[in-house]
Amino acid sequence: MEVDRPFDYVERIPGGAIITTTVDKVLEWGRESSLWYMLFGLACCAIEMMAAGAARFDLDRFGMIFRATPRQSDLMIVAGTVTKKMASRVKRLYEQMAEPRYVVAMGSCANAGGPFADSYAVVKGVDKIIPVDIYIPGCPPRPEALINGVMELRKKMRENVRIKQGAEV
Amino acid sequence: MSSRIRTEIVEMNMGPQHPSTHGVLRLAVRLDGEVIVEAKPDVGYLHRGIEKLAELRSYVQFIPITDRIDYLASMLQNAAYVGAVEKLGGIEVPERAEYIRLIMMELQRIASHLVFFGAMALDLGATTPFLYAFREREDILDLFEMVCGARLTYNYFRPGGVSRDLPAGFYAKAKSYIAKQREKLPEYDDLFTCNQIFIARTRGVGVISAEDAINWSLSGPSLRGSGVAYDVRKVDPYCVYDKLDWQVVTKNGGDVQSRFLVRVEEIRQSLNMVEQALDMVPEGELKCKTPLRLKLPEGEVYHHIESARGDVGVYLVSDGAEKPYRMHWRSPSFVNLGAIDSVARGWKVADLVAILGSLDVVLGEVDR
Amino acid sequence: MNELQPLIIVTMTELTEKNIRDAFPKAVVQSSEADGALILKLNATMLLPVCELLRSNPELGFDYLADITAIDWKDRIELVYRITALARNEKIVLRVDLDRANPTIDSVSSVWKGAIFQEREVYDLMGVVFTGHPDLRRILLPEDWEGYPLRKDYVIPD
């Protein structure tokens, strides 16, 4: 029987009004379509993150709203330089987030220290403290780049479901 | 009043991750009920050691780093550093470059004040003015992108001039932006500035007398909101500010509302300045010739400008090499923040947010 | 016909210097001028009295402390204070040399409250101790940081 697959995770039965999918895929679709991110702007990249949330680039159309507290967020966008004084707080905030949680390192400073890499007070990348899923290069990355990074994260989230099911990557 | 009720001073921590602290600022607040007994700022969460980095970078290599100190007013930070280098090196800037610089600096001031407006509204609970302000700011960022390719950190100034010329279409686009902004400013007033809740939350709150403001070394709109007419552009003119027709904006209230109104009025003044300057830009060179490996003579210089947040000063000490011997950045946000403890005592937590917003600190500049 | 008396022109900076020298004859080690500002090199012990005079004397009225910073000259640490009299826009720069092994000086926070944060910064990054400061502790670096990064002999720990 030929199976019509309009989307990756949906099968359409011909002549019918039933779609079949898996619970995992539906849950993942729900999760990725409403990623609530924690406002964790540290430095200049925070301004581009705010601009991405504002009217022109509008992260809200992707279902993303900012939350002030880690308890209510799925995603932590580390936007800015992580200094040694701030490092322990970053770790604590990451630990306060409920799973499944994701981290996006936005900008050169969060990726690897950025233009301040040879300074005495800067941690060379936030991945020295917490695990990072997506790295967005730029100094600062444009809001479009941030949105692209979030799209890549959503793709990664979908692929993780497939890997869990034992499918071929 | 019952004397059997025992009250305690509660210690509360605001930040460093907090939606209303304008960055990674921590306020260790001690409260008696809702009333603030003490509000000590704990800064340094964004300390990147730029004064030490300046000793490791050549003069031109350091300009991109100045963008990132006060990231909401990058053009102004560029201007401060480059002005100090030019003063020490005796480098003359051609007139066309001076006018272009002035246009960029004033547009940057407007952009910074728009972010202040939006953030202040957001802190006090109103989301819509934030979206309005950022919508207008996007137009300014488009103008900057036309000129130098970047939206936030420009690296546009060079010792001796600017790096790129104004492209074709800049003049028309800038004029249309000015007209649009002038049209929208009354909208902001209707929505927010004249809003009864906003006025009730800011009038008479966090009053700083002129004498206190001077003693705390406040600068910028925080100082001018207390009636002190100190604006570096008038007092120690630089660039071509003395050739334009504009006024220093002061208000006499000394409260949060006065500091807010000073900045909103400064947007209008800056729009006037950009409009005048656009018509006054002469033809000419963009940058005078400087050696590729710029070395400054031995000596020292202190150059200060009026940034969106106050008096930014760059103190450069050179020993004749390609890199400075010592660079000190006098940061207005750092000095302004010193006053918060004394100003906030006696007010409530909600007022603390308004007071902190009215001082308009940017943590990149506080911590350097 | 009246003879015109010769006019003696005294500049603002000369008046200021004269006032300080009259009040504290031993305070000024050296004086110069640059960029329209009077630059005075002072004895470290006389800094606080001179600052108090600068602010309280109505003829001087130096009410606005613009900047405090320090330079590590390898054999000594030099403190630089910039103060402005807002009413006349007159600027003065005070410079003090301190012994590098034990840099200590009086705090001027009793004269200008704006000095509180700035002196903490100089303490944090250069290691200068300000006696009489209400709250002298590190401000930009973590409390348990060791060393003073802006000194020329500072080694970044791994």
Image (tube, grey):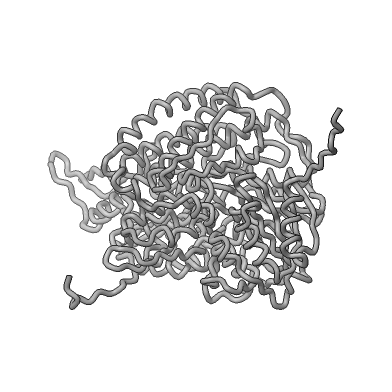
The N terminus of chain B: image quadrant: bottom left
Residue closest to the eye, B43 or B39: B39
Is C34 rendered above or below residue B274? below
Residue closest to the eye, A88 or B125: B125
- State the image coordinates of residue B112 (x, y, percent, origin top left): 48, 42
Outermost residue on the front side: it is: C1
Is B349 rendered above or below residue B148? below
The quadrant in which residue B287 appears is top right
Residue C62 seen from this side: yes
Q: In this view, does A43 lie to the left or right of A28?
A: right
- State the image coordinates of residue A65 (x, y, percent, origin top left): 31, 49
At 30% across and 48% down in the image, what residue appears? Answer: B201
At 28% across and 46% down in the image, what residue appears? Answer: B200
How many marks are shown on the rendered structure? 0
The quadrant in which residue A39 appears is bottom left
At 60% across and 45% down in the image, what residue appears? Answer: C87
Is B192 rendered above or below residue C71? above
At 37% across and 63% down in the image, what residue appears? Answer: B14
Residue A159 seen from this side: no
- State the image coordinates of residue A102 (x, y, percent, origin top left): 37, 60
The C terminus of chain B: image quadrant: bottom right
The quadrant in which residue B257 appears is top left
- State the image coordinates of residue B29 (x, y, percent, origin top left): 37, 66
Residue closest to the eye, A59 or C7: C7
Residue closest to the eye, B276 or C92: C92
